[in-house]
Image (cartoon, rainbow, N blue to C red):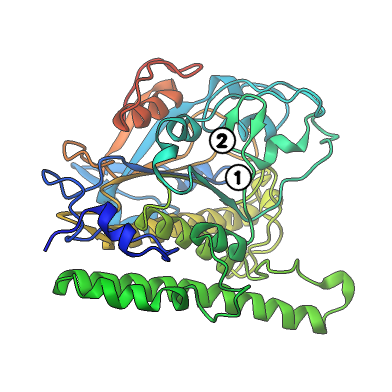
Amino acid sequence: MNLSRRTVLKGLSGLSVSLPWLEVVAENKKSKAPKIPRSAFLFAPNGVNPHHWDPKVEKGNLKLSRILSPLEKIKGEVDYFKNLYHEGSIAPGGHFPKTANFLSGVRINRTTGKDIKCGMSIDQIITRKYGHLTPLPSVELGIEATRTGISVATGYTMVYGGHISWSSPTTPMPKEIYPQLAFDRLFNSSSMNKGLNSILDEIKEDRKMLLNYLGAEDKSRMDAFFTSVRSLEKRIEDSRKRNQEKAFKAPVDKRPAEGLPEDLNEHITLMLDLIVLAFQMNRTNVATFMFGNAVSGKNYTFLDGVEGGFHQLSHHTNNKEKLEMYAKVNKYIISQYGRMISNMKKIKEGDSNLLDNSFVLFGSGLRDGNKHSPIDLPILLAGKGGHKDIKRGKHRVYPKKTPMANLLIGIAQRSGIEINKLFYGNKAFI
């Protein structure tokens, strides 16, 4: 028996959990995969150790660098870009002119806050066309709250350092940094207020009804889906409880922010898993994630041999020990990118998978954090956006100072958006 998407949703009137792709839901008889690509844009602050970033091609084989080595098992799913830059980032001011414009390339207005001006980012250009088709037009996540005030060293408002997503030149999109609040928004959940242990408690009867219509493969897919929902829900709840316990025991000035994971690795993995789940559930088609704000001083001492804040390490002054720690932080961040796209590849959607039906871009607005250079940016792109003609696993070397905006235009065009120019870019590629 085939059900239309509308029939399923009407039958599950109380359901606050959107369904993943199912064989029984015949949204399009000619195609078993979603038509609109999901697009995720991941930003890392502070650049990379340039001595351990670039891959090589030897005798036709791609050889990954030390920092990129966590991608070894999935290296064929990723393109590695060389010589991209943002002309609009060539400006004094350190990190700030190279963060806010990461997804546009526009030159930001140097201001202390009264007249901020950037440019509409590519994620929001995509959202403008497709946002009405999903419960959430877009999702913006991070791990650090946006700071207010002025950077004395640069003369820029620090608002620029906390946003890569802009719905207009003067409107940055607020990002969520609390996993529980992000989860609640994703599900439109009121389970906590109802005293329920899980969001899944709200839909017990609907789940039973739905299973009567499903074949063996769909039942297995739904079981795995609900297991992943509950697992993520429990991880968030456990993190919240641990923080409450530590807050009760710790001195007042040592207490972690309520509901914010104290464990940095846990915080990052939760937020990335939420994006994957949002895509799987068709809650949104567009997401951004910031591994940290501009000049992020997040501490990665959970990594063996790493001491000091990330920003401090990026200003290595060619010190051997700092360069080593800088590379270790970079490698960890890439491992999280790899983990995300690996998980997406495991989620089947007809004869394809979630990764192949998505674009997942990773990058930084700086090359070497020590030089603050926006030339030859570290940029990666995974996923095919549903296009079978796209082949990944290539080291794409372009002429020096090729606009990164061309890549952003390419993603938009492959997403069905008519755009031929984006600030300093006017030639699409992907």
> Could you say which is closer to the camera, residue 64 or residue 229?
229
**Residue 53, above or below 377:** below
Q: Earlier in the sequence, mark 2 or mark 1?
A: 1
Q: Which image quarter is the N terminus in?
A: bottom left
**Residue 105, above or below 277:** above
Q: Position of residue 38 (x, y in %)?
A: 36, 44
- Residue drawn at (28%, 60%) of the image: 8
Q: Pointer 1: what residue? A: 45
Left or right, 187 with reference to 314:
left
- Which amino acid is tagged 2? Gly
Tell me whether the residue at label 2 lies in contact with that at label 1, contact meaning CB atoms closer than 8 angstroms: yes
Element under disc 2: loop
Observer able to see residue 186: yes
Q: Which image quarter is the C terminus in?
A: top left
Q: Pointer 2: what residue? A: 365
Left or right, 391 with reference to 173:
left
Q: Position of residue 180 (x, y in %)?
A: 60, 66
- Residue drawn at (30%, 49%) of the image: 63
Total tally of numbered discs in the picture: 2
- Residue drawn at (53%, 60%) of the image: 188
- Which amino acid is tagged 1? Pro
> Could you say which is closer to the camera, residue 149 or residue 209?
209
**Residue 19, above or below 377:** below
> Could you say which is closer to the camera, residue 237 or residue 315?
237
